[in-house]
Image (spheres, rainbow, N blue to C red):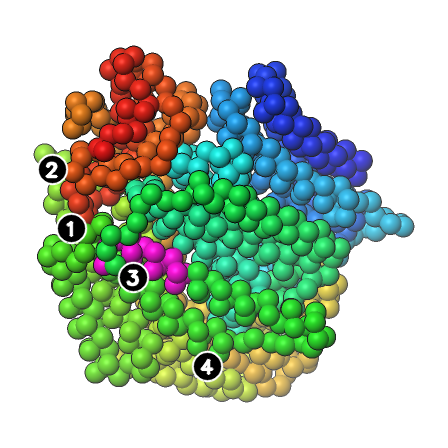
Amino acid sequence: MTVLGTVLLVLAASSYLLAIFAGIATIRSKSRRSSRWLWQYMLIGALAIVAAVFAMEWALLSHDFSIAYVVRNHQRATPVLYTIASLWGALEGSILLWALVVGVGFALVAIRFRRQLTDELVVWTLVVGAGIAFFFAGLMVSVANPFAATQGAIPADGMGMNPLLRNHILMVVHPPMLYVGYAGFSVPFAFAAAALITGRLGEGWLLLTRRATLIAWGFLTLGIIMGAWWSYEVLGWGGYWAWDPVENASLLPWLTGTAYLHSVVIQERRAMLRVWNLSLLLATYCLTILGTFLTRSGVVNSVHAFSESSIGPALLGFLAVVSVGGIVLIASRGERLRSPGQIDSPVSREAAFLANNFVLAALAFVVLLGTVFPLVAEAINGEQLSVGEPYFDRLGMPLGLAILFLMAVTPLLPWRAGLTQTAKDRILVPAWIGGTVMVIAAIGGIRGIGPVLTLGLGAFALAGILGQFRQGWAGTRSSGRRVAARALALVRSHPRRYGGLVVHAGVVVVAVAIAGSQSFSRHVESELSTGDEVQIASSSPFADDYTIRFDGVRTATTAEQTISYATLSVWRDEESLGTYEPAIALFPRAQQAIGTPAVRTGLIEDLYLTVVRIPDDQSGAVTIGVGINPMMLWLWLGGGLMLIGTLLALVPRTRSGSSAPDAGGRSVQRSTDDDVGDPDRTVDSYRGTAAPVGGGNSEPGPAQPAAPTTPGEPIPVAVPASNAVGSEDEEAPVTVTSSGPRRSGADASRMGS
């Protein structure tokens, strides 16, 4: 298996290198033969990586201890699910999983655009993708080979994974979610790089990568939420986020990716912020590489990080190449990236989007500085510094509140126009609701300005979101349809809009839950002998205290571990709430003890029980930790809402079966998200102008290349859904269908001028 696995990795690296050469040959010769080679090499590389993953899984499941990775990360007694998860439980396997996501992602791009493989934008995208895939395959061939042979005698059994990684089922799903999120940003980054290289700097590449970007962001969001849940359920400290460097490494690309998803709406609608969007996408991808470096190089001390390894310099070199190359490309296209549009009013939706971007970028900078400054200081002065929670909380809280405010206001503002009477009417009721909630919270004894503002702004945002759903619902015609059918029709009419609103609702719920859990949590530790009791007050003034009685210790032994359970009976107001057993598991091979909390989840608060210490003879007093963590269920529900909103945003938009003439007499028909990436369409057909249709309030769009002139050939043009200045409707791309050879792409690009 060692030889087979290594051969597969060499085959993958060679295929990606040949794909780069084939791509360059295609660009120079426009040859369909070389483009077919490019397509085939991308698929061969991906298939080789897939085969290598199956080979490693087979080695783990068959206990093949001739492979060093299996020895270090597998044990015969390990359950099957954790054995499968051992693939991403250590450095080399995690690089293999990363290469799998990158390889499969770009193979799907090659398959999707197989009919346009002589188009320079597609070819350069695959060349960049092949370069990224070659880097990770090369890492495995050189310094991080997961199939390296065991040195010396082959042992009868292995050491097994880190005990922290085999103590909860989330190990099976949490890391792959993060990897798909990290590596998923490779696809939009490659398209952006291709657009810069080819000089095709319109909005076409944005449409091509819309779904890929949203999918990557969604997986990264899910990975972060699962990571917080895992920390809460496994580490036993009662929290879910500690501003750990590796936690921050996943948050950084999420913040810049979120900013990108918002600002790209302005580019699609107004052809603005091109340099900013490209910079955000470059920063997002660079931060995924930085996160990989922090996690896998061993430079930070973290419960999430791997031990010191030799791939750190290679990752830093790759980060330098990507960042410097991206900056040079953006700078070289500076003149052509100038945006024709401008912000007409500081009180408009695009201005609020821009402010939201600046706040998200500022928060990302705060997190980045607090994460890397200790590393830089240690490298320069040799002094170990630590940046703790007070730094992040003090600087992050006002920025978080600003994000909540902008999230509440932005969807209620009009495009272009200032604060119109319609916008004032939309804002008034949600603002009153938010203010009322703040007053009630302050009178009700909520302590601290942060929680009070969070509750008020959260209520403001939720009221605005519900108002927009109510307005959309009123606009749907029931015509005897059931509620579910009307709801589906509403979402499909504007999937990105309503999906985004659901995501915003999830963010609000998460923010309120964080404020509640941080402001009203409490924790006590007590030494208890059998029969002793401890009491702790509820976070709710309307609920009775909890009484916890220690009933003794029981022990269970498996081939992997010895588990000591503390049996605790819980009452409230003389009503039994059941028996709970927090535990400490000792893993003899690793000589490591891992605590597992017992959690009673409630709508208002969690009762969090841990074992701090159990005497070796198990006959003396034990130390029990008892915590009250308010609103934790709402934190996970908010994360679920964010996931649901992301899925809704990916729903195909309803196709319009009819067309209507525009101001120039041409037939205009709305295109849908289904058109994006359609293999039957040429890539050029995605390149349109951002000029609005209808005249009167248009502005010139960016210069466009000639579009097809074949009768009936679609010429997409990004226009607002309404032609009125300050339209508050969501923009939708439209397709202008030419009626004969006299129509040209230039005609379409001048529409509305």
Q: Give the residue drawn at x 18%, y 48%.
A: 726
Q: Name the amino acid, label 1.
A: Arg
Distance, label 3 to label 4, CA atoms, is 35 Å
Find out whether the residues at labels 2 and 4 contact each other: C-beta distance under 8 Å: no
Distance, label 4 to label 1, CA atoms, is 42 Å
Give the residue at mark 3: 406
What crowding class fits label 2: few (fewer than 14 Cα within 10 Å), some (14-19), or many (20 or more)?
few
Give the residue at mark 1: 470
Decide if residue 621 is on the left or right side of residue 137.
left
Decide if residue 515 is on the left or right side of residue 29.
left
Find out whether the residues at labels 2 and 1 contact each other: C-beta distance under 8 Å: no
Q: Residue furthest right?
A: 152
Q: Nearer the viewer, mark 3 or mark 4?
A: 3
Per the image, is 359 magenta? yes
Q: Nearer the viewer, mark 2 or mark 4?
A: 2
Give the residue at mark 4: 523
Q: Give above or below for 244 relative to 494.
A: below
Visible residue check, residue 123? yes
Q: Give the residue drawn at x 22%, y 65%.
A: 460
